[in-house]
Image: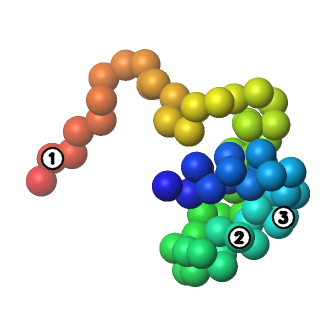
Amino acid sequence: DQRICIKFCFKLKKTAVGTHRVLVEAFGENAMSQSKTFLWYKRFKDGRTSVDDDERSGRPSTSTT
């Protein structure tokens, strides 16, 4: 999971830009966007420890076909 990679890079004191470069090198065109990488980097910088999505309130979305 790319969030785990972001957390790992943060722990290694890489910059957010450097972290995104690592993701692009490792995942190529499947790498997380730079803005999303920066968002997750900031979350870890602000003290977040979990790499999981936040729980959402309300009913789960459903699709109909």
- Residue drawn at x 81%, y 37% is 45
Q: Residue furthest front?
A: 12
Front in this rendered view, residue 13 or 52: 13
- Callout 1: few (<14), some (14-19), or many (20+) C-alpha neighbours within 10 Å? few
**Up/down of 24 relative to 13, above or below:** below
Tell me the residue that label 1 is attached to.
64
Coordinates of residue 59 in the picture (x, y in percent): 30, 23
Between the C-alphas of marks 3 and 2, the distance is 9 Å
Q: Secondary structure at mark 3?
A: helix
Quarter-of-image position of residue 22: bottom right
Tell me the residue that label 2 is attached to.
22
Between the C-alphas of marks 2 and 1, the distance is 39 Å
Give the number of marks: 3
Front in this rendered view, residue 20 or 55: 20
Q: Is residue 32 visible?
A: yes
Q: Is residue 35 visible?
A: no
- Residue drawn at x 58%, y 80% is 28
Q: Are marks 3 and 1 in contact (CB under 8 Å)?
A: no
Tell me the residue that label 3 is attached to.
17
Q: Which mark is residue 11?
A: none
Q: Secondary structure at mark 1?
A: loop
**Up/down of 60 relative to 9, above or below:** above
* Earlier-in-chain disc, 3 versus 2: 3
Given the image, on which type of amino acid does mark 1 rest? Thr
* Earlier-in-chain disc, 3 versus 1: 3
Given the image, on which type of amino acid does mark 2 rest? Val
Between the C-alphas of marks 3 and 1, the distance is 40 Å
- Residue drawn at x 50%, y 36% is 52
Coordinates of residue 40 in the picture (x, y in percent): 69, 45
- Callout 3: few (<14), some (14-19), or many (20+) C-alpha neighbours within 10 Å? few
Q: Is residue 46 left or right of residue 25?
A: right
* Earlier-in-chain disc, 2 versus 1: 2
